[in-house]
Amino acid sequence: METNSSMKTVSGLPNVSLSFTYFLVFVFSLSLGYVTLLHHEMWRDELQAWLIAIGSTSVGDLFQNIQYERHPALWYLNLYLLSRLSEMPMVMQVFHILLATAGIYLFTRFAPFTNLQKFCFAFGYFPFYEYGVISRGYVIGLVCLFAFCALQSRAQKYSLVQACALALLANTSVYGAMIAFAFGIYLVVDWLTVVRAKQGSEKSRTLLLSLFIVGLGAATSIVQIIPPPDSSFQIPQRAAGSTTSNTATEVGETLTAVERSYLPIPRQGLHFWNTNFLEDRPRVQRLLSIGLLGFAAWLLVRTPVTLVVYAVLHNTAYHPTVGYVILDICSSCSCAVYGFPCLALVREILRRSAQPFSPFQRR
């Protein structure tokens, strides 16, 4: 029976229409380009990176100029190359639009979600605005993260391409390094508990080489992130002779970050940036955070590997990049669905919210 080309699906991924993928990518890029190029006024962090790239006379000079930025050099290296073509910041914006569109393409084509969920994700606040309109290096992390998950869905586990994606992810930001570390753990534990039992030591060398690449990428990132001694950004130290412990306060603040990530609803008013509608009620925030974490753990308890990755990924939940948690959830669920039978967190919440929860078995 001849199949209509408009109904083609991605190999191994049921109910994923390529026509919908191309349509969503086209609408996303067109909308993003319109908003970004015609209506977005770039703010200081965007232009700061671009001005550093323009003002650097060489790659060595670039590394010297970014030592106080507290970010790895990957984004700045891309801007440095672009700035050799033109000094107009629109060049950076166009490049950023292409990266954001590539990330949405990977998500739309390979993520194990419905078309409606993919559409809502693509035009949600974080993917569209934070990682689409605002030209920052975080968009490279989005592309690398989704590329890793796409390879996972295509049964390309433990490939060197996956390792390179995580190594690049580690060099996008400190949060990207945390996510790369978490998925490095995922590869090891998954291999020890699942793959080795089925394939013996066939892929051991590939896995070890992949871990070396990821570790090298993470180490490179950490070296670049560490601020110089005269930097104004230093880790606060407890005063000498002080016996007061702030552990309880710090734990409470960390818990509130979970609620801020899952419920990123700002306060109403002129100065809404990085605010939360419950920040005046920390006890409510902490209770909601504990409930959300417990609910997620209950859904993923049958797949310990995914649960470990999910827990480690929540190190990225802290202000100001709470949007990474949205990416973390989607990535964890993608690996869970394609790695082994599990309870897929987002898929269960969005598709079975009106029914009793049951294991989502991989086909």
Image: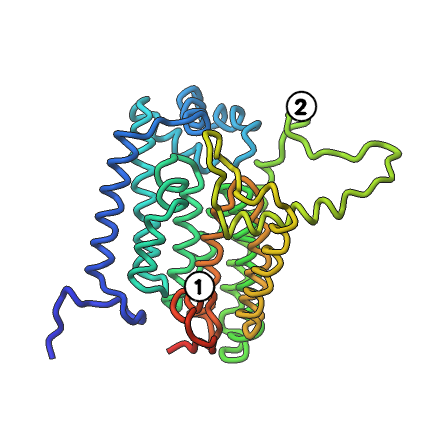
Query: Position of 102 compared to 199: left or right?
Result: left
Q: Name the residue under label 1.
A: 346
Counting labels gives 2
Label 1 or label 2, whichever comes before in sequence order? 2
**Which one is in front in this view, the residue at disc 1 or the one at disc 2?**
1
Picture residue at 63% right of the left edge, 52% below the top: 286
In which image quadrant can residue 18 be found?
bottom left
Frontmost residue, 285 versus 210? 285
- Quadrant occupied by the N terminus: bottom left
Depth check, front residue: 174 or 160: 174
Q: Where is residue 15 in the image (x, y as percent from the top left)?
A: 27, 69
Give x and y (percent) for residue 52.
45, 23
Residue type for callout 2 = Asp
Please, what secondary structure does the residue beneath circle 2 have? loop
State how far apart marks 1 and 2 are (Cα): 44 Å
Location of residue 29 by image quarter: top left
Query: Mark 1: which amino acid?
Result: Val
At which x and y percent is residue 170? Answer: 51, 46
Disc marking residue 360: none
- Residue 143 in the image: state x and y as whole percent: 39, 49
Residue drawn at point x = 76 percent, y = 46 percent: 247
Residue at left offset 40%, top offset 65%? 350
Callout 2 crowding tier (Cα within 10 Å): few <14, some 14–19, many ≥20:
few
Q: Quadrant of the C terminus?
A: bottom left
* Disc 2 target residue: 230
Q: Quadrant of residue 42?
A: top left
Would residue 201 appear left or right of 92 to someone viewing this image? right
